[in-house]
């Protein structure tokens, strides 16, 4: 089971005097990069909420937005009538102006705003809404992870098929290398010691032997699929395995000395690069 770091979760709750919408978005990141935007009334709850989100989401660039829409006619802003009256009196002393009220209303301290107190019962409902948004985001991540998993399996199968072709080509490759060397000796038109030539040939072919690389690559591909199907999502571990796969593929390519085999190596590298790119988005 793997999870994508890309996700989106949303929940809406209707309270007595307001509607609250919570949105949580996440993108890929090496570590947890958490950004929260909380209204002033709920600011004291921001740290516990950040802890909750960090525990559940683990990694990713996460944005948490809190939107409040008033649904009651009641307002927390009130006009300070005494202040406005004093402003109007002073403005009238300066002369007769038709827009003195408009000027007065733009001056300081005209409005007073009642500070809302945090209601415990209200916050309990909001916490449930936060949990709902988190669960929705987790479901989104799992769905995206399933898509990534299927893509990885397809690409690993392609690499395995290319490796099977490499194994089939290996005998022809060694024969082609031997024939090239024999032809080069023949073109020199010199007499060589056959035993010595055979020893040198064996030494040279041993340096081009890819038996260990084939075995290790096959094991790495198997380990990648096992990790992919484990109970936890471990993108970093899959990244390390993909590096080992790349190391073996590169070594096979450097030893190939045979065009049909090098073609298979290029195809394996192409699939592996696509895997590495997608792994950046795995939790």
Image: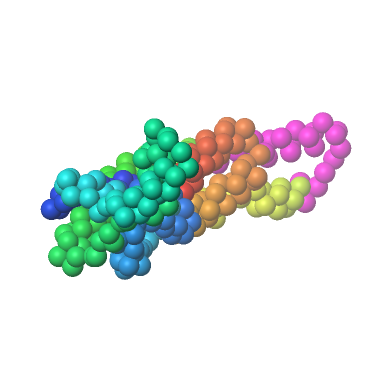
Region rendered in magenta: 167-196
Q: Quadrant of residue 122?
A: bottom left
Residue 116 horizontal/vertical position (percent): 25, 61
Against 200, is 169 above or below? Answer: above
> In screen coordinates, is 86 left or right of 258?
left
> In screen coordinates, is 113 left or right of 268?
left
In front here: 136 or 79?
79
Residue 161 horizontal/vertical position (percent): 43, 39
Q: Main secondary structure of the magenta part?
A: helix
Q: Quadrant of residue 52?
A: bottom left
Q: Residue at x 48, y 42 (%)?
A: 94
Residue 159 horizontal/vertical position (percent): 45, 41
Q: Is residue 182 part of the magenta span, yes or no?
A: yes
In front here: 65 or 215?
65
Q: Is residue 259 part of the magenta span, yes or no?
A: no
Q: Residue at x 17, y 45 (%)?
A: 73
In front here: 18 or 161?
18
In front here: 152 or 161?
152
Residue 71 horizontal/vertical position (percent): 17, 45
Against 50, is 247 above or below? Answer: above
Quadrant position of the N terminus in the picture: bottom left
> In screen coordinates, is 99 left or right of 276?
left
């Amino acid at each position: 089971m793997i999870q994508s770091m890309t996700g989106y979760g949303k929940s809406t709750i209707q309270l007595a005097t307001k509607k609250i919408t919570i949105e949580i978005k996440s993108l890929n990141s090496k570590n947890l990069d958490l950004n929260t935007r909380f209204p002033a009334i709920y600011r004291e709850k921001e740290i516990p909420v950040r802890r909750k989100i960090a525990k559940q989401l683990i990694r990713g660039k996460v944005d948490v937005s809190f939107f409040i829409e008033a649904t009651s006619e009641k307002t927390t802003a009130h006009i300070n009538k005494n202040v406005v009256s004093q402003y109007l009196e002073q403005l009238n002393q300066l002369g007769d102006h038709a827009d003195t009220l408009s000027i007065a209303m733009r001056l300081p301290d005209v409005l007073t705003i009642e500070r809302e107190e945090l209601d415990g019962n209200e916050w309990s409902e909001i916490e449930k809404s936060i949990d709902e948004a988190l669960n929705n985001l987790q479901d989104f991540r799992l769905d995206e992870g399933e898509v990534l998993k299927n893509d990885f399996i397809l690409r690993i199968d392609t690499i395995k098929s290319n490796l099977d072709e490499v194994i089939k080509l290996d005998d022809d490759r060694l024969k082609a290398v031997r024939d090239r060397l024999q032809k080069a000796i023949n073109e020199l038109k010199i007499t060589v010691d056959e035993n010595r030539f055979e020893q040198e040939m064996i030494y040279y072919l041993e340096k081009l032997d890819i038996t260990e690389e084939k075995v290790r690559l096959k094991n790495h591909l198997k380990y990648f699929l096992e990790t992919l199907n484990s109970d936890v999502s471990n993108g970093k571990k899959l990244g390390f395995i993909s590096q080992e796969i790349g190391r073996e593929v590169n070594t096979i390519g450097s030893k190939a000395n045979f065009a049909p085999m090098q073609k298979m190596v290029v195809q394996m590298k192409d699939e592996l690069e696509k895997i590495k790119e997608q792994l950046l988005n795995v939790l």
